Amino acid sequence: HMDTSNEDQKVEIKEDPVQLSIFAHRFMGIAEQMGRTLARTAISVNIKERLDFSCALFTNDGGLVANAPHIPVHLGAMQSAVRFQFEYWNREGREGINEGDVFVSNHPQLAGGSHLPDITVITPVFHEGKILFFVASRGHHSDIGGISPGSMPPHSTNLEEEGARIVAFKLVKNGKFQEEGITDILVNQEYGGTRNLKDNLSDLRAQVAANNSGIRLLHQLVEENGLDTVEAYMHFIQHNAEMAVRHMLKDFAAQHGTKTHAIDYMDDGTPIELTINIDPDSGSACFDFEGTGPQILGNLNAPPAVTYSAVIYSLRSLVGQDIPLNEGCLAPIEFKIPHYSILNPSDDAGVVGGNVLTSQRVVDVVLKAFKACAASQGCMNNLTFGDSKFGYYETIAGGAGAGPTWNGRSGVHTHCTNTRITDPEILERRYPVLLRQFGLRKGSGGDGKHKGGDGVIREIEPLRPLVMSILSERRCLQPYGLEGGEPAKTGRNLLIKKNGISLNIGAKRSGAINVGERIVIESPGGGGYGAK
C-alpha cells in the first residue's frame, strides 16, 4: 500500500484487489473510449480504417498508467514523449504549461517519437489549477512530406528526408487551434511539404477531440471516487504490473538460470544482440544490447523509445495474467544500449524503417532469449504509393511463429504492428488501384512439431502512373525456428512488367509503376517449433 495523504490529513488508502481490477478496467475503458472518438472523428483511411493509432493515460509526472491496446510500438515511446513535453515547457524562459494548452510532437530522437509519421498530441488534465494527469493520442499520418509519397521512403539516409520534424509546439494555445503555426511546420520543409494538409489538420483536430473525451471521463472518475483514490489506484496499477513482471523474471531464472542471450540479424547483416542478467531474489533484470551493430547510413535505425516499446510488449506477452500495459512493466528493467548503435542513433539519423522493421527484430530477439516461441514474419511489409496529390500507406500481414503448445497463425499482423489492412472495397473506391489478389501464401510457414503460420500474397495494379515504395525485411535471412523447428520462407517483392516478366525488386525499393504493371508482395511466414 502507499500513503497518498498530506501532513494535515492522515487518510491512508489501502489496496483492495477487487477495486484494483475495477480501476484497471475503468482506466483501460477511458483509453479505449478515446480511441473510439479518434476513429470516429478522423477522416484519413490510416486512422479511421487501419486504426493506426494509440491512446493513453499518464500520471502527472508522465508515467504510463493505461493505454488502449492498439499499436505496441507506440507504447513505451509515448511515455518518453509526454515526459519530454513536461520538461521542455517547464524550463526557465519558456511559457510553462497552462490550461487550454495542447502539445504536439513527433521527433523520434529528441522528443520521444517513434518515427515522423506518428504524430503525438498531448493534453494536460487540470483540476483547480493543478495538473493531475496527462492524456495523449498518437496517430500515423499517411503523409507528412519528405522525399516520397506516403512519407515512408525506403532510401532516406537522414531524418530531414523523412518529413516534418516537430520537437515541441503548442497545437492549441488558450483553447485556440494554432492552424497557421502547424501548417507552416508541415508545409515548409527542405524536401517538399505534406501532400495532404487537409487530412493532417483534420486528424490532428480529431486527436485533440479524443484527448478531450479522455479528460471528460477522467474528471467523471475523480468526481465519483475522489482524487486521492484515483491517484492511489493509478500507482497501485503500476505497482501491480511491476510485481507481475518481477514474478515472471524470477520464474524464468529458476527454470533456465539467471543469464540468457540471443542474437539475430537484419537483412544487411547488422547484428542485434541481447544479454539478459536476472537477479533471482528481486526479479530485476539488465537488458544489455552490447554487440549490436553500428548506426547505419539508411533508415533502419531505431531510437531508444522503440526498443523500450518492443521490450514492454514482449514482457507483457510473457506475463501469464491480464495486466494493463504500463510503466510498471519496465520498472524492474535496466537498459544498456550502446551509443550510436542501430538501437541508439544520433539525432539526425534516418529512422523511418527502425520503428516498423527493427522493432520487430528486437521483439524476435527478446522472445528468443526467453525461449518463448519461434520468429514471426519479423517485418511489417510497408507498402506506400501516391503522387503529388496523395499518399497511401499500409502494412501487410504475415506468419506468426509457433510455440511450445501452439501452431503459428497465418496471415496476421504480428507483434508490433497490430493494425488492420484497408478493406478491398475502401481501397479500390478511394484510391486509383485494383487489388488483383490477396490470400495466404501456402507452405511459407516453418515446419515442425508445431507449424509456423503462412505469410500472404498481395498483388496491386495501378490505374494511373504512381510512385510505389516497399520497405521490408526478412527478404534475405529466414525467420528462425526453435527447438528443432524449421525456419520459415523469406518474403519476396516482385514487379510484373507488361510483357509478363517478373522482376525481383528487393527488400527496399521506390520507383514509378505504370498502368499495366503490377506489384506482388509475398510476406514471410513464421518459424516452426520442435522437431517433427
Image: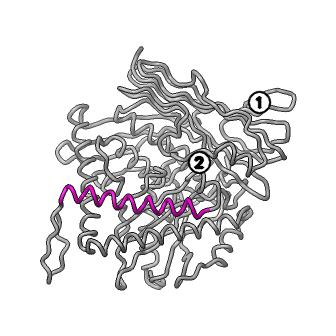
Point out residue 110 in the picture as x, y percentages from the top left corner: 51, 64
Point out residue 359 in the picture as x, y percentages from the top left corner: 49, 45
Q: Is the magenta stretch mostly helix, strand or loop?
A: helix
> Looking at the image, which residue sits at the far top?
532
* Residue under label 2: 353
Q: Does residue 91 appear to the left or right of 347 in the view shown?
A: left
Which residue is rendered at x = 46% and y = 30% of the image?
401
Residue 503's disc is: 1
Which residue is rendered at x = 47% and y = 63% of the image?
34
* Magenta range: 16-42
Q: Is residue 351 above or below residue 137?
A: above
Point out residue 24 in the picture as x, y percentages from the top left corner: 31, 57
The picture quadrant where one finds residue 348 is: bottom right
> In the rendered structure, which amino acid carries the disc numbered 1?
Leu
> In the rendered structure, which amino acid carries the disc numbered 2?
Gly
Judging depth in this view, the residue of 68 and 369 nearest the camera is: 68
Disc 1 residue crowd, few under 14, some 14–19, many 20+, Cα 10 Å: few
Q: Is there a contact, CB below 8 Å, between mark 2 and mark 1? A: no
Q: Can residue 109 be seen in this view?
A: no
Which residue is rendered at x = 36% and y = 81% of the image?
127
Q: Is mark 1 on a helix, strand or loop?
A: strand
